Image (spheres, rainbow, N blue to C red):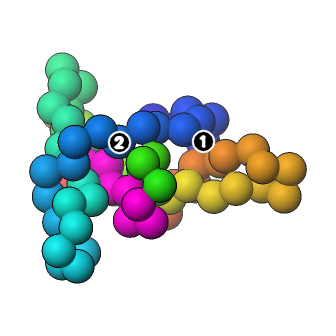
């Protein structure tokens, strides 16, 4: 995960993270750790991602659009569990 990852399509969400009755989030497990991706505005693309790595390092990211339309991910939190 990084600021220039770009659009992350979110298919088949399995969790209703914000409790509005719409499935909006999905957990993905890989060799590096776990990522929770959420599409809270329902456009089919993730707008929030939280990662937890095998060593306990975590980071939260939010997607923002620059005035020219370029998608940037901003790290909003990080640390170690
Ligand atoms: Ca979205």
In terms of sequence position, does the residue under pointer 2 or pointer 1 come before the other?
A: 1
Position of residue 11 measured from the top left corner of the image (x, y, whole percent):
29, 39
Query: In the rendered image of this protein, does residue 61 appear above or below residue 55?
Result: below
Range covered by the magenta-colored residues: 36-42
Name the secondary structure under disc 2.
Answer: loop
Task: Indicate the quadrant where residue 7 lies.
Answer: top right
Q: Quadrant of the N terminus?
A: top left
> In the drawing, what numbered circle is on residue 10?
2
Name the secondary structure under disc 1.
Answer: loop
> In the drawing, what numbered circle is on residue 51?
none
Q: Does the beta carbon of the residue at mark 2 sit less than 8 Å from ligand 1?
A: yes
Left or right: 25 as drawn, with respect to 9: left
Residue 27 appears in the picture as rendered: yes
- In the rendered image, the residue lying farthest to the bottom is 20
Q: Residues within 10 Å of mark 2 (few under 14, many from 20)?
A: some
Query: In the rendered image of this protein, does residue 70 appear above or below residue 64?
Result: above
Left or right: 37 as drawn, with respect to 65: left
Q: Residues within 10 Å of mark 1 (few under 14, many from 20)?
A: some
Residue 61 appears in the picture as rendered: no
Task: Indicate the quadrant where residue 10 lies.
Answer: top left
Disc 1 marks which residue? 3
Q: Does the beta carbon of the residue at mark 1 sit less than 8 Å from ligand 1?
A: no
Question: Marks 2 and 1, how far apart in space?
Answer: 18 Å
**Residue at 46% from the left image edge and 38% from the top image edge:** 8
Q: Quadrant of the C terminus?
A: bottom left
Q: Nearer the viewer, residue 27 or 74?
A: 27
**Residue at 24% from the left image edge and 54% from the top image edge:** 25
**Residue at 14% from the left image edge and 58% from the top image edge:** 15
Position of residue 3 measured from the top left corner of the image (x, y, whole percent):
60, 42
Position of residue 20 measured from the top left corner of the image (x, y, whole percent):
23, 79
Q: Is residue 40 magenta?
A: yes
**Residue at 45% from the left image edge and 47% from the top image edge:** 45
């Amino acid at each position: 995960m990084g600021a220039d990852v770009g659009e992350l399509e979110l298919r088949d969400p399995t969790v209703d993270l914000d409790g509005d009755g719409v499935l909006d989030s999905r957990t993905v497990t890989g060799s590096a750790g776990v990522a929770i991706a959420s599409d809270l505005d329902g456009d089919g693309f993730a707008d929030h991602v939280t990662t937890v790595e095998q060593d306990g390092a975590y980071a939260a990211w939010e997607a923002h659009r620059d005035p020219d339309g370029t998608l940037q991910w901003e790290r909003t939190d990080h640390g170690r569990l």
